[in-house]
Every structure is written in structure tokens, then in C-alpha cells.
Amino acid sequence: MAFTLSDDTVLVSDGGLATELEARGHDLSDDLWSARLLVDAPDEIAAVHAAYFAAGAQLATTATYQASFDGFAARGIDRTEAAELMRRSVRLARAARDEHGSGWVAASIGPYGAALANGEEYRGRYGLTVDQLTAWHRPRLEIIADAGPDLLAVETVPDVDEAEALAGLIGELGLPAWLSYTVAGSATRAGQPLAEAFAVAAGVPEIVAVGVNCCAPGDVAEAVTIAREVTGKPVVVYPNSGEVWDGPRRVWTGTSTWAPGLVPGWAQAGARIVGGCCRVRPSDISRIAADVRG
């Protein structure tokens, strides 16, 4: 059944995949982050998907956020094997969904900065043109889309140029997708106004939702309003805990400001997919699911 969104239903997405893998004892300090476990411990990825479905999630995002041909090559993995690992990520999520009995699989498409593994996705402005970013993203997107997810989760995009590259590719592929920025206040991490950023998606019918992720919970409400005003599309929101990622040290700093009680307000404003990102765990998703049902 094709993935669709309606204005009278709110779907619950999962939480931080890497966060839960770390809680299960895995060291993800490697440049591949959670994608490393596609090689070393795929059963653990499946187990985390299952945990989020059991907690009330209706969408599972795959372990491909930081998966790239460049990143795998640095580990001595050739393009053929790298492509198979990306396909494996989709199979793992689909198997967990099928065992659960319902739900959707959203294939995670992280930004170029994620593959650099130094926190660049929280800054943007890589010095690459739209054409260069399109050429970098195309092979990975084609492989992952062909693996059979229900939709693409094009996420943590920090910059309008990268969004333009990705929106063009999404239009070519014809698979439903959401486009989600990481933001600071009412601007992208690269400093562009959110109205300008969301406008990139307005004329792309394959982009079925727009929104924000891996931002502070306090940044969500305004972003929902702007996204609805600019695009008229359903909105997807899945903030992190409110802590801040220190890229050079590879640690989260600060204090959590996560408050699941915010969810009803986001839904009332137009959010139709709600979940969590880094530092948000199954127990948090259970509370989000309860808020959505309420």
C-alpha cells in the first residue's frame, strides 16, 4: 500500500537509532556511526527497530543516515558491498515492521555533512555547488530507493543549496519523501530564513511532508507554522533532546529540554508525523504515542 498522509491523522515516528544502540552497549564513535553495525551487528539494528515499534512508533527510519560510498570506502568496503549494506538497512527495517504487523519504513537520507563525520551537518555551507551535491547524493539515493522503502526520510538538511539538490533528485525518483531541516530558531543552520528553505519543497509533489529534526524542542512550534504557511503540506517534526552535539569531541553537551507534552500543540498547528531524534528513546516515544492518541 502506497504511503499517504491525511490531515486528520498524526503518525508517530521512532526516536534516535544511534542513541538506543549506544544504550545497548555499542561504541559508535566510528566515522560510520550507526551504519557500522550494518557490518558488525545487523541484528542489533533490527532489535532497536522492534523496540520502537513496540513503544508505539508507526515509522522506522533506516540505519543509512551516515552511510555513504565514501565512508564505507574508508573502511575498505568497495562500492558493490557498500550498496548491499545500504539495501540491508531497508530489509532490516522492513523485517521488524512485518514482525510487528504494521507500520512504514522511511529510508534515512542524511546530508553531505553527515558523511564528513565532523558535525558539518550542523553548519552547512560546504563550499559545493547544487550540481556537485546532486552528483554526490544521486548514487546513494538510487540504491536506497530501489531497495523498497515506503518513503524517503531526507533529514537534517542544514542548507538550502543541499535541499535544492535533494528536491530535484526526489522529483526524479518518484518515491514519496519528507524533507526535514535542522534549524536554529527560525533559520537553517546555514542561516537562511525558514520560509526560503521550505519554499524549495513547495512545487515538488513527491515531497509529501516538510519539517524539522535534530533541533531543540523549543524551535519546533514556529517551524511548523512557517512550513504550513509556505507549502500547505503536512509537517514532520522530530527534535532531539535539546542537548547540543560537540562534533570535535563527539559528545552531547548541555541539558535536555525534551517535553513530550509539547506534542499536542505541534499536532494542532499542522504536524502530521511526530517523533524524536538524537537522545530520544523508546520510553519517550511511548509518551509521544500516548499524547497523539489522547
Image (cartoon, rainbow, N blue to C red):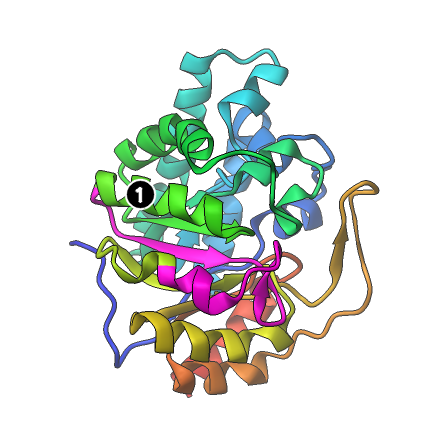
Name the element at disc 1.
Answer: helix
Give the answer, above or below, for where 177 lies relative to 210: above
Q: Position of residue 62 (x, y in %)?
A: 45, 43
Using the image as rendered, state which of residue 294 and residue 215 is in the foreground: 215
Does residue 45 appear in this view?
yes
Using the image as rendered, state which of residue 9 and residue 226 is in the foreground: 226
Q: Amino acid at mark 1?
A: Gly
Q: Is residue 214 left or right of residue 100?
A: right
| Residue 171 falls inside the magenta stretch | no
Residue 86 sits in quarter? top left
Give the answer, above or below, for where 265 lies relative to 226: below
Task: State which quarter of the image contains the N terminus.
Answer: bottom left
- Residue displayed at 32% across by 69% down: 231
Q: Position of residue 285 (x, y in %)?
A: 53, 68
Per the rendered image, the range of residues in magenta is: 174-199
Mark 1 is surrounded, within 10 Å at the Cα level, by few (under 14), some (14 to 19) or many (20 or more) other residues, namely some
Residue at the spot of label 1: 168
- Residue displayed at 57% across by 85% down: 261
Q: Is residue 123 left or right of residue 100?
A: right
Using the image as rendered, state which of residue 120 and residue 46 is in the foreground: 120
Give the answer, above or below, for where 230 lies relative to 144: below
Q: Position of residue 61 (x, y in %)?
A: 44, 50
